[in-house]
Image (cartoon, rainbow, N blue to C red):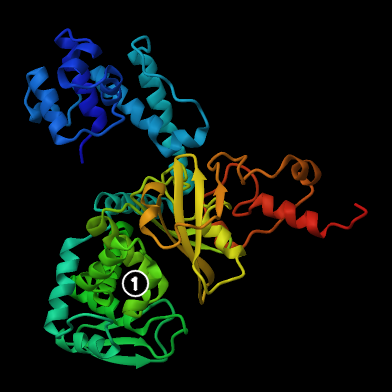
């Protein structure tokens, strides 16, 4: 990944050393001075052709431009300050960005960076036990975004396993799943006393895979078997830390999904649907006989790599808490100070939450949402599990909504989050009436999953509490 900030500062340094103005450099490369300024400030990534033009005009090699070392100590300080101000911790402070000017001394920048590091340390200590998990989730999500959630090596492994058992396409049956187990040297055993904390248990010594005898109606019995087989195929052993545990889980789930929804057949269906402007997660689900969440995940694997469409994915419980999320379309998910998404609350005007208010649970729900970073189209559906109801959503930016069925929906909402006045701060009339007069008790799982807020009751939506009290208050009060 190119470091836009470092490249921009290097271009500025080289331009200054050669006595060139922004106008001079812009004219030489065929760009407006304002565009050169944006590049020097690290706010736009450069393409190879642009790098070559800069290198030629500044009389340096491309390797020199791409060097990861800042050109000067001052440049290193400015880069560090820019990165700090673009991070989630600074955003959570609600402070205006500090312009990095020549009049801002090195000492002042070093002081600001020192304070920022101390805030990071304090937030890290506050996170305590969940810190490692949150940081690991954030880093894993960044890696998946860089790869567009596409793992070519796992796609190849799935294709080889399909070929080994003669599966040529279409839905993968339970019989073929059993054939895969036999091919890999395992027999399947369905038992009623599987440990409650496990999905399956693999006996490597005796070549056995134990799976639960009774599963909930919404569970796919093939998935449990394929996930167990995937762990074996990928050579997973006991993870050394939480980051490795997450990586193994992502790889296992990906390979299992690639076996259930083969790439070749899925891409054919999706390509034809895009040509007809009829892309739909439901069609992928029905074509391969999988549940909606698996189809939605698989869509994110293939949409960018094969269709050129950036997407986002959300899995949200009925209270609005995120359990899974992915994006490469620049939609702004809510994050905590460490950049973690899991456990955060989605804006109540996003489709992931609005879908819970829709009476028709059989039809897909489509919605446009005007957000601070742009307009997005999204399709959401409710699923039920043993842990309750949750919504699964897939969306994209406005420019790419034209490829999807449901793009003509008139449903549209405005979201101002993360501005608290959007939906996190109760309306003034309710706050005046109920502030200091309510004492809710949070659900335990919400408290443990969410980061500690700076005010209010942990894991509780104050606006919902005040609205509830308003509905149920005696009319004479």
Based on the displayed image, in which of its 4 quarters is residue 249 positioned? bottom left
Q: Identify the element where label 1 is drawn.
A: helix
Residue 245 seen in the current view? no
* Location of residue 230 with respect to 176 vertically, above or below: above
* Location of residue 351 with respect to 156 vertically, above or below: above
Residue 449: x %, y % from top left: 51, 58
Residue 32: x %, y % from top left: 26, 19
| Residue closer to the observer: 193 or 425 | 425
Please state the total of marks drawn on the protein image: 1
Toward the top, the furthest residue is 19
Q: Residues within 10 Å of mark 1 (few under 14, many from 20)?
A: many
What residue did someone put label 1 on? 284
Quadrant holding the N terminus = top left
Residue 99 seen in the current view? yes
Residue 454: x %, y % from top left: 58, 42
| Residue closer to the observer: 429 or 168 | 168
Q: Residue at x 76, y 51 (%)?
A: 438
**In the visual, does 45 lie left or right of 66?**
right
Q: Residue at x 34, y 72 (%)?
A: 284
* Location of residue 19 with respect to 345 vertically, above or below: above
Q: Residue at x 26, y 29 (%)?
A: 5
Q: Residue at x 14, y 23 (%)?
A: 54
Toward the right, the furthest residue is 476
Toward the front, the furthest residue is 276
């Amino acid at each position: 990944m190119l470091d836009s900030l470092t490249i921009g500062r290097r271009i500025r340094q080289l331009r200054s050393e050669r006595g060139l103005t922004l106008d001079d450099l812009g004219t030489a490369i065929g760009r407006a001075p304002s565009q050169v300024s944006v590049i020097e400030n690290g706010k736009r990534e450069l393409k190879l052709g642009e790098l070559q033009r800069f290198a030629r005009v500044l009389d340096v090699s491309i390797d020199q431009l791409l060097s990861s070392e800042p050109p000067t100590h001052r440049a290193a300080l400015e880069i560090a300050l820019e990165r700090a101000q673009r991070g989630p911790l600074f955003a959570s402070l609600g402070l205006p960005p500090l312009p990095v000017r020549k009049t801002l001394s090195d000492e002042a920048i070093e002081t600001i960076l020192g304070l920022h590091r101390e805030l990071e340390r304090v937030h890290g200590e506050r996170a305590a036990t969940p810190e490692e998990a949150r940081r690991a989730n954030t880093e894993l999500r960044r890696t998946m975004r860089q790869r567009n959630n596409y793992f070519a090596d796992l796609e190849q492994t799935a294709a080889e396993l399909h070929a080994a058992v003669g599966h040529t396409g279409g839905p993968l049956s339970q019989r073929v799943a059993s054939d895969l187990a036999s091919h890999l040297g395992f027999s399947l055993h369905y038992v009623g006393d599987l440990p409650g904390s496990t999905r399956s248990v693999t006996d490597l010594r005796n070549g056995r895979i134990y799976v639960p005898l009774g599963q909930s109606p919404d569970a796919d019995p093939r998935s449990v078997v394929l996930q167990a087989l995937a762990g074996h195929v990928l050579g997973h052993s006991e993870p050394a830390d939480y980051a490795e545990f997450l990586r193994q889980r992502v790889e296992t789930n990906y390979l299992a999904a690639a076996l259930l929804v083969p790439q070749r057949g899925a891409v054919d269906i999706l390509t034809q649907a895009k040509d007809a402007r009829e892309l739909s997660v439901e069609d992928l689900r029905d074509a391969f006989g999988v549940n909606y969440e698996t189809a939605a995940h698989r869509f994110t694997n293939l949409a960018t790599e094969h269709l050129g469409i950036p997407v986002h994915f959300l899995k949200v419980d009925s209270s609005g808490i995120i359990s899974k999320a992915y994006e490469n379309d620049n939609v702004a998910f809510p994050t905590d100070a460490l950049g973690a998404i899991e456990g955060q609350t989605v804006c109540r005007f996003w489709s992931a939450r609005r879908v819970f208010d829709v009476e028709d649970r059989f039809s897909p729900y489509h919605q446009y949402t005007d957000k601070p970073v742009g307009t997005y189209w999204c399709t959401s559906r409710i699923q039920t599990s043993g842990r309750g109801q949750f919504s699964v959503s897939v969306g994209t930016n406005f420019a790419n909504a034209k490829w999807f069925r449901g793009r003509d929906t008139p449903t549209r909402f405005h979201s101002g989050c993360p501005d608290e006045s959007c939906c996190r701060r109760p309306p003034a009339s309710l706050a005046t009436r109920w502030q200091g007069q309510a004492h809710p008790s949070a659900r335990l799982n919400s408290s443990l999953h969410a980061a500690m807020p700076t005010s209010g009751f942990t894991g509780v939506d104050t606006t919902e509490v005040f609205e509830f009290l308003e509905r149920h208050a005696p009319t004479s009060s």
